[in-house]
Amino acid sequence: MISVVNRSNAKYYNTVCDKMDDIMHVGNISLLEAAKWSCVTSQSTKYEDKGFVGIFQIGKEWWCSPTGGGICKVACVKFLDDDIRDDFECAMKIYKGHDNTFSAWPGNELCLEKQAEIRASKCHKQLESEIPESVEDFN
């Protein structure tokens, strides 16, 4: 079992694939895009004690504040709960504010297209097997 745990948030994933699945559904994005986010945020966890919070490692200095300020206008503590929707919305603001790149995240250069493709490929079969083929599969 692979554990993807970030001490600074309350959201825990048993596997990288679980994390990617959550990101994919919350963000309504492809598996490959979720793999990119997963890779970038995994690299950024090395900097969690340096002012970054939550699954998307959002910087406390610019993007959130204790009172709900910052560019995202969200209290940083909101990024520490199990609901990652507001986290993803803020992360997308950061991404778009940096010309649709991951340049705001430390370590992003380690997550090139090839690494994301490898992550997506490894998780594709696992996630595909969890999706029912038809309505009858729900019964």
Image (spheres, grey):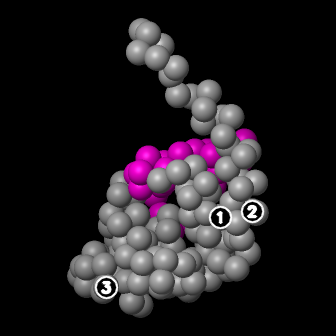
Over which residues does the magenta segment extend?
A: 1-28
Q: Position of residue 113 (x, y in %)?
A: 70, 66
Disc 3 on helix, strand or loop?
A: loop
Q: Are marks 3 and 1 in contact (CB under 8 Å)?
A: no
Residue 14 falls within the magenta-colored stretch: yes
| Identity, as a three-letter code, of the amino acid under mark 1 | Cys
Q: Is residue 37 visible?
A: yes
The one nearer the camera, 42 or 21, is 21
Image quadrant holding the N terminus, namely top right
Instruction: Please give the residue where the numbered disc 3 appears in the rendered image.
Output: 71
Q: Are marks 2 and 3 in contact (CB under 8 Å)?
A: no
> As displayed, is residue 118 above or below residue 127?
below
Instruction: Please give the residue where the numbered disc 2 appears in the rendered image.
Output: 115
> As displayed, is residue 55 above or below residue 28?
below
Q: Residue at image x 53%, y 84%?
A: 104
Q: Position of residue 102 (x, y in %)?
A: 56, 77
Residue 11 falls within the magenta-colored stretch: yes
Mark 3 or mark 2, which is nearer the start of the sequence?
Answer: 3
Q: Residue at image x 41%, y 15%?
A: 135
Rounded to the nearest angstrom, the CA distance separating label 2 from label 3 is 30 Å
> Residue 66, located in which quarter of the rendered image?
bottom left
The one nearer the camera, 115 or 47, is 115
Q: Are marks 1 and 2 in contact (CB under 8 Å)?
A: yes
* Residue density around tag 3, few if under 14, some if 14–19, many if 20 or more, within 10 Å: some
| Identity, as a three-letter code, of the amino acid under mark 2 | Gln
Labels 2, 3: front one: 2
Q: Position of residue 38 (x, y in %)?
A: 60, 60
